[in-house]
Image (cartoon, helix red, strand yellow):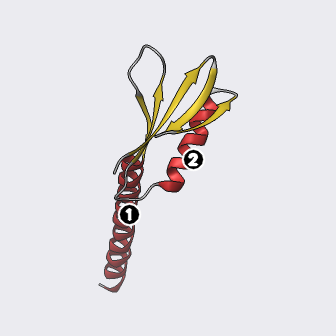
Amino acid sequence: MLREFYVTCRVEKWFVAEGTESHGPYLSQRDAIADASEAAELLAKPKNAITVLLKVPGSNAELIWSSKKTFASLKTRSQEHEAAELLKAGALVSDYLEQTM
């Protein structure tokens, strides 16, 4: 199930809405986005996507943050770290073999 947090502006005040719940007003768009993103990160799980969208009057909603991107990024970083560790291990083995031959 997809959960969506909408950051919206009403009467020059910023709010975060999720379903029927609304939080705010916030002092700025930045504060509302920060709060929505923090809440989404805390609630995010790999199988339950959460998005933060900015919706201003007269425009389409703009994706600000997505848990799908976060988990994909974490997976990529983990794979990059593993690859780096394998390269280091390979270099150590090569150095050892050069020294013993």
**91, 61: nearer the viewer:** 61
State the residue position of label 1.
Answer: 84
Residue 56 coordinates in the image, percent (x, y): 49, 20
Q: Earlier in the sequence, mark 2 or mark 1?
A: 2
Q: Position of residue 3 (x, y in %)?
A: 41, 46
Q: Which mark is residue 18?
A: none
Q: What is the three-letter code of the residue carrying label 1?
A: Ala
* Label 2 Cα neighbours within 10 Å, binned few <14 / some 14-19 / many ≥20: few
Q: Is residue 29 visible?
A: no
Identify which residue, 38 or 90, lies in the foreground.
38
Q: Where 60 falls versus 39 (above or below)?
A: above
Position of residue 26 in the picture relative to residue 36 (left or right): right
96 with respect to 38 (left or right)? left
Nearest the eye: 86 or 1: 1
| Circle 1 Cα neighbour tier, 10 Å, few/some/many (<14 / 14–19 / ≥20) | few
Q: Residue at x 29, y 84 (%)?
A: 101
Give the residue drawn at x 32%, y 72%: 90
User: Label 2, on which residue?
Assistant: 38
* Residue 41 as seen in the image, left or right of residue 45: right
Quadrant assignment, res 15: top right
- x, y (%) of residue 78? 39, 62
Residue at the extreme right: 27
Q: Amino acid at mark 2?
A: Glu
Q: Residue furthest bottom?
A: 100
In terms of secondary structure, where does tag 2 sit? helix
Residue sitting farthest toward the front: 20
